[in-house]
Amino acid sequence: MNKTIRNTEPKIIWNHFSDINAIPRPSKKEGRIVNFIENFGKRLDLDTSTDAIGNVLIKKPATPGFENCKTVVLQSHLDMVHQKNNDTVFNFETDGILMEIQQGWITAKGTTLGADNGIGVAAIMSVLSSTNIEHPAIEALFTVDEETGMTGAMELQPNFLSGDILLNLDTEDDDEISIGCAGGVDITATKKYELTKTPEKNICYQLIIDGLSGGHSGMDIHKGLGNSNKLLNRILTHLDAFLEFSLISFRAGNLRNAIPREGIAILSISKNDQALFMKELCTISSILKNEFKLKESQLNIASNEVPTTLECMTSSFQKRFLSSISALHNGVFSMNAKINDLVETSNNVARIIAENGTMEIACLTRSFSESGKENLVNSIKSVFLLANYNISISGDYPGWEPNPKTEICAILKETYHDLFDDQPNIIACHAGLECGILGTHYPNMEMISFGPTIKGAHSPDEKVNIKSTQKFWKYLLEILKRIPVK
Protein backbone atom coordinates (compact mmCIF):
# COMPACT_ATOMS: atom_id res chain seq x y z
CA MET A 1 0.00 0.00 0.00
CA ASN A 2 2.94 2.35 0.64
CA LYS A 3 3.82 2.16 -3.08
CA THR A 4 0.25 3.11 -3.98
CA ILE A 5 0.42 6.10 -1.65
CA ARG A 6 3.73 7.20 -3.17
CA ASN A 7 2.14 7.14 -6.63
CA THR A 8 -0.79 9.32 -5.52
CA GLU A 9 -0.84 12.92 -6.74
CA PRO A 10 0.86 15.15 -5.85
CA LYS A 11 3.58 12.49 -5.76
CA ILE A 12 6.20 14.89 -4.43
CA ILE A 13 4.21 15.45 -1.21
CA TRP A 14 3.17 11.83 -0.65
CA ASN A 15 6.74 10.61 -1.17
CA HIS A 16 8.09 13.02 1.42
CA PHE A 17 5.19 12.18 3.76
CA SER A 18 5.93 8.47 3.38
CA ASP A 19 9.60 9.13 4.14
CA ILE A 20 8.94 10.97 7.38
CA ASN A 21 6.22 8.53 8.48
CA ALA A 22 8.82 5.77 8.35
CA ILE A 23 10.67 7.61 11.14
CA PRO A 24 9.37 7.46 14.75
CA ARG A 25 8.73 11.04 15.89
CA PRO A 26 6.64 11.25 19.07
CA SER A 27 6.78 14.55 20.94
CA LYS A 28 9.94 15.08 23.00
CA LYS A 29 11.68 12.23 21.15
CA GLU A 30 12.28 13.88 17.77
CA GLY A 31 16.03 13.19 17.54
CA ARG A 32 15.76 10.90 14.53
CA ILE A 33 13.44 13.14 12.54
CA VAL A 34 15.60 16.19 13.35
CA ASN A 35 18.66 14.34 11.99
CA PHE A 36 16.68 13.32 8.92
CA ILE A 37 15.63 16.91 8.14
CA GLU A 38 19.15 18.19 8.74
CA ASN A 39 20.56 15.64 6.29
CA PHE A 40 17.75 16.42 3.84
CA GLY A 41 18.76 20.09 3.73
CA LYS A 42 22.44 19.30 3.44
CA ARG A 43 21.87 16.82 0.58
CA LEU A 44 20.16 19.65 -1.31
CA ASP A 45 23.23 21.81 -0.61
CA LEU A 46 21.04 24.35 1.19
CA ASP A 47 22.01 26.47 4.19
CA THR A 48 20.92 24.25 7.11
CA SER A 49 21.20 24.97 10.83
CA THR A 50 19.73 23.68 14.10
CA ASP A 51 19.25 25.69 17.28
CA ALA A 52 19.82 24.49 20.84
CA ILE A 53 16.31 23.09 21.36
CA GLY A 54 16.30 21.15 18.05
CA ASN A 55 14.44 23.42 15.63
CA VAL A 56 15.81 23.06 12.11
CA LEU A 57 16.08 25.98 9.66
CA ILE A 58 16.73 25.42 5.94
CA LYS A 59 17.16 28.42 3.66
CA LYS A 60 16.55 28.38 -0.09
CA PRO A 61 17.27 31.38 -2.34
CA ALA A 62 14.55 32.94 -4.45
CA THR A 63 14.01 31.64 -7.97
CA PRO A 64 14.75 34.03 -10.87
CA GLY A 65 12.36 36.97 -10.94
CA PHE A 66 11.42 36.72 -7.26
CA GLU A 67 14.61 38.09 -5.71
CA ASN A 68 12.97 41.38 -4.67
CA CYS A 69 10.00 39.75 -2.95
CA LYS A 70 9.60 39.52 0.80
CA THR A 71 11.20 36.49 2.42
CA VAL A 72 8.70 33.80 3.41
CA VAL A 73 9.02 31.56 6.45
CA LEU A 74 7.33 28.20 5.80
CA GLN A 75 6.70 26.60 9.19
CA SER A 76 5.47 23.23 10.46
CA HIS A 77 6.22 21.04 13.48
CA LEU A 78 8.06 17.72 13.32
CA ASP A 79 6.48 15.87 16.24
CA MET A 80 3.22 13.94 16.20
CA VAL A 81 0.66 12.82 18.77
CA HIS A 82 1.10 9.14 19.57
CA GLN A 83 -2.27 7.50 20.18
CA LYS A 84 -3.31 3.94 19.35
CA ASN A 85 -6.20 1.61 19.91
CA ASN A 86 -5.82 -0.73 22.87
CA ASP A 87 -5.82 -3.79 20.62
CA THR A 88 -3.14 -2.38 18.29
CA VAL A 89 0.40 -3.65 18.85
CA PHE A 90 2.64 -0.68 18.05
CA ASN A 91 5.68 1.08 19.52
CA PHE A 92 5.82 4.77 18.61
CA GLU A 93 9.50 4.93 19.56
CA THR A 94 10.60 2.20 17.14
CA ASP A 95 7.89 1.61 14.52
CA GLY A 96 7.03 3.55 11.38
CA ILE A 97 3.40 4.46 10.71
CA LEU A 98 1.48 1.87 8.66
CA MET A 99 -0.64 3.78 6.15
CA GLU A 100 -3.50 2.82 3.86
CA ILE A 101 -6.02 4.46 1.51
CA GLN A 102 -9.71 4.30 2.39
CA GLN A 103 -12.30 5.93 0.13
CA GLY A 104 -10.22 8.92 -0.87
CA TRP A 105 -8.52 9.38 2.50
CA ILE A 106 -5.11 8.33 3.75
CA THR A 107 -5.22 6.91 7.25
CA ALA A 108 -3.17 4.64 9.53
CA LYS A 109 -3.76 1.13 10.84
CA GLY A 110 -4.89 1.53 14.44
CA THR A 111 -2.75 4.57 15.27
CA THR A 112 -2.58 8.28 14.69
CA LEU A 113 -1.42 9.10 11.17
CA GLY A 114 0.81 12.09 11.82
CA ALA A 115 -0.78 14.21 9.09
CA ASP A 116 -0.86 16.75 11.90
CA ASN A 117 1.62 18.21 11.05
CA GLY A 118 3.43 15.79 8.75
CA ILE A 119 1.58 17.01 5.66
CA GLY A 120 2.84 20.52 6.36
CA VAL A 121 6.38 19.20 6.78
CA ALA A 122 6.10 17.22 3.54
CA ALA A 123 4.80 20.26 1.65
CA ILE A 124 7.74 22.38 2.83
CA MET A 125 10.17 19.62 1.88
CA SER A 126 8.52 19.55 -1.55
CA VAL A 127 9.16 23.26 -2.07
CA LEU A 128 12.76 22.88 -0.92
CA SER A 129 13.49 19.89 -3.16
CA SER A 130 11.74 21.25 -6.26
CA THR A 131 13.56 22.49 -9.32
CA ASN A 132 10.63 24.11 -11.13
CA ILE A 133 8.52 25.86 -8.45
CA GLU A 134 8.60 29.66 -8.51
CA HIS A 135 9.02 31.23 -5.08
CA PRO A 136 10.66 34.07 -3.14
CA ALA A 137 13.50 33.45 -0.71
CA ILE A 138 12.39 30.69 1.67
CA GLU A 139 13.24 30.08 5.31
CA ALA A 140 11.87 26.63 6.17
CA LEU A 141 11.39 26.32 9.92
CA PHE A 142 10.75 22.84 11.35
CA THR A 143 9.92 23.07 15.06
CA VAL A 144 9.96 20.39 17.75
CA ASP A 145 7.61 19.43 20.58
CA GLU A 146 4.60 21.44 19.44
CA GLU A 147 2.10 18.89 20.70
CA THR A 148 3.16 18.68 24.35
CA GLY A 149 4.21 22.20 25.24
CA MET A 150 5.12 24.29 22.19
CA THR A 151 8.69 23.94 23.42
CA GLY A 152 10.35 24.47 20.06
CA ALA A 153 8.50 27.74 19.44
CA MET A 154 8.92 28.88 23.03
CA GLU A 155 12.69 28.36 23.02
CA LEU A 156 13.39 29.40 19.45
CA GLN A 157 16.91 30.77 19.19
CA PRO A 158 16.94 34.60 19.02
CA ASN A 159 17.47 36.06 15.55
CA PHE A 160 17.10 32.60 14.02
CA LEU A 161 14.70 33.99 11.41
CA SER A 162 14.87 37.04 9.17
CA GLY A 163 11.71 36.55 7.11
CA ASP A 164 8.90 39.04 6.62
CA ILE A 165 5.89 36.69 6.33
CA LEU A 166 5.24 33.37 8.10
CA LEU A 167 3.00 30.73 6.51
CA ASN A 168 2.09 28.14 9.15
CA LEU A 169 0.81 24.95 7.46
CA ASP A 170 -1.08 23.51 10.45
CA THR A 171 -4.77 24.35 9.87
CA GLU A 172 -7.01 21.32 9.26
CA ASP A 173 -9.81 22.44 6.90
CA ASP A 174 -8.89 23.41 3.35
CA ASP A 175 -11.49 26.19 3.12
CA GLU A 176 -10.26 27.92 6.28
CA ILE A 177 -7.59 30.55 6.84
CA SER A 178 -6.57 30.87 10.49
CA ILE A 179 -5.65 34.31 11.79
CA GLY A 180 -5.74 33.61 15.53
CA CYS A 181 -5.64 30.85 18.13
CA ALA A 182 -6.09 30.17 21.82
CA GLY A 183 -3.33 30.07 24.39
CA GLY A 184 -3.03 27.30 26.92
CA VAL A 185 -1.60 26.06 30.19
CA ASP A 186 -1.06 22.66 31.83
CA ILE A 187 -2.47 22.01 35.30
CA THR A 188 -1.36 18.94 37.22
CA ALA A 189 -2.59 17.69 40.59
CA THR A 190 -0.67 15.00 42.49
CA LYS A 191 -1.11 13.25 45.81
CA LYS A 192 0.46 10.44 47.79
CA TYR A 193 -2.34 8.60 49.58
CA GLU A 194 -2.51 5.89 52.20
CA LEU A 195 -3.51 2.37 51.34
CA THR A 196 -5.58 0.04 53.47
CA LYS A 197 -6.23 -3.69 53.34
CA THR A 198 -8.91 -4.82 50.94
CA PRO A 199 -11.78 -6.37 52.95
CA GLU A 200 -11.37 -10.11 53.32
CA LYS A 201 -13.48 -12.41 51.17
CA ASN A 202 -14.29 -9.55 48.80
CA ILE A 203 -14.03 -10.07 45.05
CA CYS A 204 -12.51 -7.67 42.52
CA TYR A 205 -13.99 -6.39 39.28
CA GLN A 206 -12.39 -4.47 36.47
CA LEU A 207 -14.55 -1.78 34.88
CA ILE A 208 -13.68 -0.90 31.29
CA ILE A 209 -14.90 2.03 29.23
CA ASP A 210 -13.84 2.32 25.60
CA GLY A 211 -15.18 2.93 22.10
CA LEU A 212 -15.24 6.72 22.56
CA SER A 213 -14.29 8.95 19.64
CA GLY A 214 -11.54 10.96 21.27
CA GLY A 215 -10.09 13.79 19.22
CA HIS A 216 -8.29 17.11 19.46
CA SER A 217 -8.80 18.74 22.84
CA GLY A 218 -9.00 22.16 21.20
CA MET A 219 -10.59 21.71 17.78
CA ASP A 220 -13.10 19.09 18.98
CA ILE A 221 -13.87 20.34 22.50
CA HIS A 222 -17.14 21.99 21.41
CA LYS A 223 -18.58 18.70 20.13
CA GLY A 224 -19.53 17.44 23.60
CA LEU A 225 -17.79 14.11 23.08
CA GLY A 226 -17.46 11.61 25.89
CA ASN A 227 -14.45 11.97 28.19
CA SER A 228 -13.41 8.59 29.61
CA ASN A 229 -12.15 10.15 32.85
CA LYS A 230 -15.45 11.85 33.58
CA LEU A 231 -17.61 8.93 32.43
CA LEU A 232 -15.68 6.34 34.40
CA ASN A 233 -16.05 8.55 37.45
CA ARG A 234 -19.80 8.86 36.81
CA ILE A 235 -20.08 5.08 36.79
CA LEU A 236 -18.23 4.79 40.10
CA THR A 237 -20.22 7.63 41.67
CA HIS A 238 -23.47 5.95 40.65
CA LEU A 239 -22.36 2.63 42.13
CA ASP A 240 -21.30 4.38 45.33
CA ALA A 241 -24.91 5.45 45.94
CA PHE A 242 -26.10 1.82 46.04
CA LEU A 243 -23.32 -0.35 47.45
CA GLU A 244 -20.04 -0.19 49.28
CA PHE A 245 -16.89 -0.79 47.29
CA SER A 246 -13.18 -0.18 47.70
CA LEU A 247 -11.38 1.46 44.80
CA ILE A 248 -8.07 -0.17 44.00
CA SER A 249 -7.03 1.75 40.90
CA PHE A 250 -8.25 4.28 38.32
CA ARG A 251 -6.45 4.81 35.02
CA ALA A 252 -7.86 6.72 32.04
CA GLY A 253 -6.63 9.01 29.30
CA ASN A 254 -3.16 9.75 28.03
CA LEU A 255 -2.04 12.99 26.37
CA ARG A 256 -3.23 16.45 27.44
CA ASN A 257 -4.12 17.52 23.91
CA ALA A 258 -6.25 14.45 23.21
CA ILE A 259 -9.79 13.93 24.49
CA PRO A 260 -9.48 10.65 26.45
CA ARG A 261 -11.16 7.63 24.85
CA GLU A 262 -10.56 4.71 27.22
CA GLY A 263 -10.30 3.95 30.92
CA ILE A 264 -10.06 1.13 33.46
CA ALA A 265 -10.92 1.03 37.16
CA ILE A 266 -10.52 -1.90 39.54
CA LEU A 267 -12.73 -2.14 42.62
CA SER A 268 -13.47 -4.62 45.38
CA ILE A 269 -17.00 -5.55 46.47
CA SER A 270 -18.64 -7.98 48.83
CA LYS A 271 -19.67 -11.28 47.27
CA ASN A 272 -23.15 -10.56 48.61
CA ASP A 273 -23.36 -7.44 46.43
CA GLN A 274 -22.55 -9.07 43.11
CA ALA A 275 -26.12 -9.06 41.85
CA LEU A 276 -26.67 -5.46 42.97
CA PHE A 277 -23.36 -4.43 41.37
CA MET A 278 -24.34 -5.92 38.02
CA LYS A 279 -27.82 -4.43 38.20
CA GLU A 280 -26.61 -0.88 38.89
CA LEU A 281 -23.76 -1.15 36.40
CA CYS A 282 -26.37 -2.07 33.79
CA THR A 283 -28.50 0.89 34.88
CA ILE A 284 -25.75 3.52 34.62
CA SER A 285 -24.48 1.97 31.36
CA SER A 286 -27.94 2.37 29.83
CA ILE A 287 -28.16 5.95 31.06
CA LEU A 288 -24.80 6.90 29.55
CA LYS A 289 -25.38 5.09 26.26
CA ASN A 290 -28.73 6.81 25.87
CA GLU A 291 -27.23 10.19 26.77
CA PHE A 292 -24.43 9.81 24.21
CA LYS A 293 -26.23 7.75 21.56
CA LEU A 294 -25.92 10.47 18.91
CA LYS A 295 -22.33 11.46 19.65
CA GLU A 296 -20.73 8.24 20.87
CA SER A 297 -22.54 5.36 19.21
CA GLN A 298 -19.63 2.97 19.87
CA LEU A 299 -19.47 3.64 23.61
CA ASN A 300 -18.76 0.38 25.41
CA ILE A 301 -18.91 -0.30 29.15
CA ALA A 302 -17.89 -3.72 30.40
CA SER A 303 -16.80 -5.54 33.55
CA ASN A 304 -15.01 -8.73 34.38
CA GLU A 305 -13.82 -10.40 37.54
CA VAL A 306 -10.07 -10.17 38.23
CA PRO A 307 -7.78 -11.61 40.91
CA THR A 308 -8.16 -10.08 44.36
CA THR A 309 -5.79 -7.25 45.24
CA LEU A 310 -4.58 -6.90 48.82
CA GLU A 311 -4.60 -3.09 49.14
CA CYS A 312 -7.01 -0.31 48.16
CA MET A 313 -7.74 3.37 48.84
CA THR A 314 -8.94 4.38 52.26
CA SER A 315 -12.65 5.21 52.26
CA SER A 316 -11.94 8.87 53.10
CA PHE A 317 -9.52 9.36 50.22
CA GLN A 318 -11.78 7.45 47.84
CA LYS A 319 -14.68 9.80 48.62
CA ARG A 320 -12.45 12.86 48.17
CA PHE A 321 -10.98 11.48 44.94
CA LEU A 322 -14.32 10.73 43.29
CA SER A 323 -15.83 14.02 44.46
CA SER A 324 -12.93 16.04 43.07
CA ILE A 325 -13.31 14.48 39.62
CA SER A 326 -17.05 15.16 39.71
CA ALA A 327 -16.42 18.82 40.54
CA LEU A 328 -13.68 19.26 37.94
CA HIS A 329 -14.83 21.24 34.89
CA ASN A 330 -14.41 19.52 31.54
CA GLY A 331 -15.31 20.90 28.10
CA VAL A 332 -16.41 24.37 27.00
CA PHE A 333 -16.31 26.97 29.77
CA SER A 334 -17.23 30.09 27.77
CA MET A 335 -17.82 31.25 24.18
CA ASN A 336 -16.13 34.14 22.40
CA ALA A 337 -18.20 37.34 22.41
CA LYS A 338 -16.76 38.69 19.13
CA ILE A 339 -16.73 35.66 16.82
CA ASN A 340 -19.80 33.46 16.44
CA ASP A 341 -19.49 29.79 17.45
CA LEU A 342 -15.90 30.20 18.65
CA VAL A 343 -14.98 28.63 21.98
CA GLU A 344 -13.31 31.21 24.22
CA THR A 345 -12.18 29.07 27.17
CA SER A 346 -12.17 25.32 27.82
CA ASN A 347 -10.59 22.56 29.87
CA ASN A 348 -9.70 18.98 28.98
CA VAL A 349 -9.46 16.54 31.88
CA ALA A 350 -6.88 14.59 29.96
CA ARG A 351 -5.39 11.93 32.20
CA ILE A 352 -6.10 10.46 35.63
CA ILE A 353 -3.93 7.80 37.22
CA ALA A 354 -4.49 6.60 40.79
CA GLU A 355 -2.86 3.37 41.88
CA ASN A 356 -0.44 2.00 44.48
CA GLY A 357 -0.73 5.10 46.66
CA THR A 358 0.07 7.69 43.97
CA MET A 359 -2.40 9.92 42.13
CA GLU A 360 -2.03 12.32 39.21
CA ILE A 361 -4.66 14.38 37.40
CA ALA A 362 -3.53 16.21 34.23
CA CYS A 363 -5.54 18.98 32.54
CA LEU A 364 -5.03 21.33 29.60
CA THR A 365 -6.82 24.67 29.88
CA ARG A 366 -7.15 26.84 26.74
CA SER A 367 -8.38 30.39 26.19
CA PHE A 368 -8.14 33.32 23.78
CA SER A 369 -8.22 35.57 26.82
CA GLU A 370 -5.49 35.64 29.46
CA SER A 371 -8.05 36.72 32.04
CA GLY A 372 -10.42 33.95 30.96
CA LYS A 373 -7.62 31.42 31.21
CA GLU A 374 -6.69 32.67 34.67
CA ASN A 375 -10.32 32.48 35.79
CA LEU A 376 -10.74 28.83 34.78
CA VAL A 377 -7.32 27.89 36.16
CA ASN A 378 -8.31 29.37 39.51
CA SER A 379 -11.56 27.40 39.43
CA ILE A 380 -9.72 24.16 38.76
CA LYS A 381 -7.08 24.95 41.37
CA SER A 382 -9.85 25.53 43.90
CA VAL A 383 -11.15 22.00 43.36
CA PHE A 384 -7.67 20.60 43.88
CA LEU A 385 -7.00 22.78 46.93
CA LEU A 386 -10.24 21.66 48.59
CA ALA A 387 -9.19 18.07 47.95
CA ASN A 388 -5.77 18.81 49.50
CA TYR A 389 -3.85 17.89 46.35
CA ASN A 390 -0.48 19.28 45.31
CA ILE A 391 -0.77 21.59 42.29
CA SER A 392 1.70 22.53 39.57
CA ILE A 393 1.21 24.92 36.65
CA SER A 394 3.43 24.57 33.57
CA GLY A 395 3.68 25.05 29.82
CA ASP A 396 1.85 28.39 29.76
CA TYR A 397 1.82 29.84 26.25
CA PRO A 398 0.08 32.89 24.77
CA GLY A 399 -2.74 33.04 22.26
CA TRP A 400 -2.54 34.67 18.84
CA GLU A 401 -4.67 37.80 18.59
CA PRO A 402 -6.74 37.75 15.36
CA ASN A 403 -5.95 40.47 12.81
CA PRO A 404 -7.94 40.15 9.55
CA LYS A 405 -6.38 43.29 8.02
CA THR A 406 -2.86 42.08 7.28
CA GLU A 407 -1.46 42.18 3.75
CA ILE A 408 -0.90 38.41 3.69
CA CYS A 409 -4.50 37.75 4.72
CA ALA A 410 -5.71 39.84 1.77
CA ILE A 411 -3.39 37.91 -0.57
CA LEU A 412 -4.66 34.53 0.65
CA LYS A 413 -8.31 35.60 0.32
CA GLU A 414 -7.81 36.91 -3.23
CA THR A 415 -5.77 33.86 -4.27
CA TYR A 416 -8.39 31.46 -2.91
CA HIS A 417 -11.16 33.25 -4.78
CA ASP A 418 -9.21 33.33 -8.04
CA LEU A 419 -8.33 29.61 -7.88
CA PHE A 420 -11.56 28.13 -6.53
CA ASP A 421 -14.23 30.76 -7.34
CA ASP A 422 -15.29 30.86 -3.69
CA GLN A 423 -14.56 32.72 -0.48
CA PRO A 424 -12.48 31.11 2.27
CA ASN A 425 -13.59 31.14 5.90
CA ILE A 426 -11.41 33.50 7.90
CA ILE A 427 -11.28 31.99 11.36
CA ALA A 428 -9.60 31.92 14.72
CA CYS A 429 -9.27 28.41 16.16
CA HIS A 430 -9.43 27.05 19.68
CA ALA A 431 -6.37 24.89 19.08
CA GLY A 432 -2.90 26.08 19.96
CA LEU A 433 -0.90 27.19 16.92
CA GLU A 434 2.73 28.20 17.19
CA CYS A 435 2.03 31.57 15.57
CA GLY A 436 1.13 33.18 18.90
CA ILE A 437 4.46 32.21 20.43
CA LEU A 438 6.50 32.96 17.32
CA GLY A 439 4.80 36.34 17.24
CA THR A 440 6.27 37.17 20.64
CA HIS A 441 9.75 36.57 19.16
CA TYR A 442 8.99 38.42 15.90
CA PRO A 443 6.21 40.96 16.58
CA ASN A 444 6.56 42.62 13.16
CA MET A 445 6.27 39.42 11.13
CA GLU A 446 2.89 38.87 9.46
CA MET A 447 1.57 35.37 10.14
CA ILE A 448 -1.22 33.21 8.80
CA SER A 449 -2.13 29.51 8.83
CA PHE A 450 -3.79 27.14 6.36
CA GLY A 451 -3.64 23.48 5.32
CA PRO A 452 -5.50 20.47 3.87
CA THR A 453 -8.52 18.79 5.45
CA ILE A 454 -7.56 16.46 8.29
CA LYS A 455 -10.16 14.65 10.40
CA GLY A 456 -9.75 12.91 13.75
CA ALA A 457 -6.41 14.51 14.63
CA HIS A 458 -4.94 13.24 17.92
CA SER A 459 -6.91 9.99 17.64
CA PRO A 460 -6.41 6.67 15.81
CA ASP A 461 -9.18 7.82 13.46
CA GLU A 462 -6.91 10.55 12.03
CA LYS A 463 -7.07 10.81 8.24
CA VAL A 464 -6.13 13.32 5.53
CA ASN A 465 -8.15 13.84 2.37
CA ILE A 466 -6.30 13.21 -0.89
CA LYS A 467 -8.24 15.69 -3.08
CA SER A 468 -7.95 18.30 -0.35
CA THR A 469 -4.18 17.84 -0.28
CA GLN A 470 -4.11 18.42 -4.04
CA LYS A 471 -6.13 21.60 -3.53
CA PHE A 472 -3.83 22.75 -0.70
CA TRP A 473 -0.70 22.15 -2.81
CA LYS A 474 -2.11 24.16 -5.74
CA TYR A 475 -3.05 26.95 -3.30
CA LEU A 476 0.38 27.05 -1.65
CA LEU A 477 2.23 27.25 -4.95
CA GLU A 478 0.07 30.13 -6.16
CA ILE A 479 0.49 32.01 -2.86
CA LEU A 480 4.28 31.79 -3.22
CA LYS A 481 4.00 33.42 -6.66
CA ARG A 482 2.00 36.33 -5.21
CA ILE A 483 4.25 37.33 -2.33
CA PRO A 484 4.71 41.13 -2.59
CA VAL A 485 7.99 42.94 -3.08
CA LYS A 486 9.87 44.28 -0.10
Image (cartoon, grey):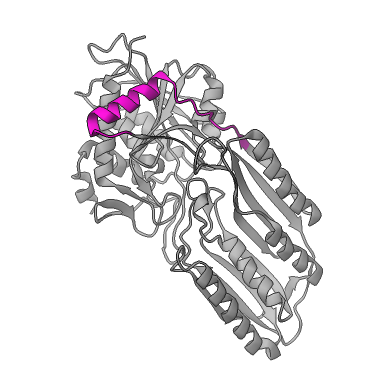
* Residue 289 versus residue 366 in the image, above or below: below
The quadrant the N terminus occupies is: bottom left
Residue 388 position in % (x across, y down): 81, 55
Residue 166, picture quadrant: top left
**How many labels sit on residues?**
0
In the rendered image, residue 418 lying in the magenta stretch gets the answer yes
Return the residue nearer the eye: 470 or 64.
470
**On the rendered structure, is 374 left or right of 434?**
right
Return the residue nearer the eye: 472 or 179.
179
Residue 481 position in % (x across, y down): 26, 20
Return the residue nearer the eye: 432 or 265.
432
| Residue that appears at 75% across and 53% down | 383
The quadrant the C terminus occupies is: top left
**Can residue 58 be seen in this snapshot?**
no
In the rendered image, residue 416 lying in the magenta stretch gets the answer yes
**On the rendered structure, is 472 left or right of 226?**
left
Residue 142 position in % (x across, y down): 42, 31
In magenta, the rendered stretch is 396-423
| Residue that appears at 50% across and 16% down | 444
Return the residue nearer the eye: 481 or 159.
481
**On the rendered structure, is 100 left or right of 47?**
left
* Residue 139 versus residue 37 in the image, above or below: above
Residue 483, picture quadrant: top left
* Residue 74 versus residue 464 in the image, above or below: above
